Amino acid sequence: MVTKVIFDTDPGVDDTAALLFIHAAPELDLVGITTVFGNAHIETTTRNALYLAERFNIPCPVAQGAGQALKRRYEGPPTFIHGVDGLGDVGVPETISRTVDPRPAHRFIIDMVKAHPGEITLIAVGRMTNLALALEEAPEIAGLVKQVVIMGGAFGQNGHGGNVTPAAEANIIGDPEAADIMLGVPWPVVVVGLDVTKETFMAPEGLARLVREAGDAGRFIAETSELYKQFHIDRHGLDGIFMHDSCAVAYVLAPELFTTRSGAMRVATEGIAVGQTIQKPDSVNFAPGAWDGLPSQLACIGIDHEAVLELFHQKLALLGN
Ligand code: BDR
Ligand code: CA
């Protein structure tokens, strides 16, 4: 069965690899790309999404989303990770012939979910702002979505805390209020956080394999990843790149490659731990508290990272044929 997917994204170097992973997978039907600020300003992430759609013949609409968080000021792009252009400074053309959908991203999401009740999987790999806005305008969509799989957060599993602060991951601290809203409604959410994405990195041999096997898509991923690779060397002393956003796509394709833990989740919205994702595991009893009455969601706490990378390569190679 083919799964309909809306990809909510801030391209973004690892977002680009994830988008091409979705595009390559015959099991997934990409019905829309929605953009959000984060790795770059919203005008840039939208321009990049349009460019990727045009260059790789991705036929679905692209809808522009939020340019700032629900309640906070955007502090500006992490150019040392994704470049000034959000795509590793490879030189993206300023003008793209593909144009945006007239609807804002959150309304596009609402319309698509209502048009295909029970069929849409949302894969969200940027700030959760568009999802929160969609829920605010049409709370009933929570009952109509098949599944929500997000890249974001960190639960301290496998030794992985935050990547912006010791407590917080970038997509969540970028809009903690939005993340707290979308985790608290009764739709089935799977959180693919740093606990598993930092276990999943592609070494230079993997990038070389993409160049050999995955045609223009493989070459583009390798090219856009150069600056991102340098960041991993400088920051982590690691000769390889984290495949954060692709792990969320892998979960949709092969959930059996992940171990999950069930429980209600909250996001700290103030204090030194702002942006921290905290789960109350269903298996543990606690005194009454802030997690009560909220739906149980799944946090990924383990991953077969070699199998996930192999899956990525196998799907991407389909674009090289
Ligand atoms: C997340 O933040 C962004 O830099 C990446 O695209 C990914 O979605 C990792 O923390
Ligand atoms: Ca991202």
Image: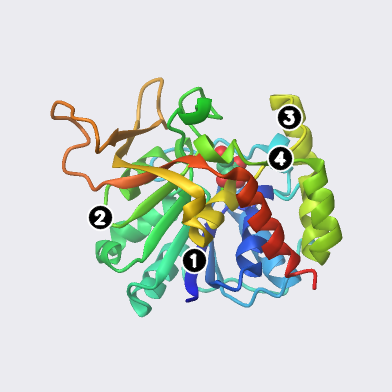
Q: Earlier in the sequence, mark 2 or mark 3?
A: 2
User: Disc number at residue 186?
Assistant: 2
Residue in the image at 84% along x and 57% along y: 211
What amino acid is at disc 2? Answer: Pro
Residue in the image at 49% along x and 68% along y: 5
Residue in the image at 14% along x and 26% along y: 287
Left or right of 80 in this view: 285: left
What amino acid is at disc 3? Answer: Leu
Give the Cα distance between marks 4 and 1.
Answer: 25 Å
Q: Residue 321's quadrant in the figure? A: bottom right
What amino acid is at disc 4? Answer: Ile
Q: Which residue is mark 4?
A: 241
Give the Cα distance between marks 4 and 3.
Answer: 8 Å
Left or right of 53 in this view: 27: left
Q: Which residue is mark 3?
A: 238
- Ligand 1 resides in the quarter of the picture at top right
Establish if 281 lies above or below 234: below
Q: Nearer the viewer, mark 4 or mark 1?
A: 4
Establish if 266 lies above or below 321: above
Residue 170 is situated, as x and y percent measured from the top left of the image, at: 53, 37
Q: Which residue is mark 1?
A: 6
What amino acid is at disc 1? Answer: Ile
Q: Residue 288's quadrant in the figure? A: top left
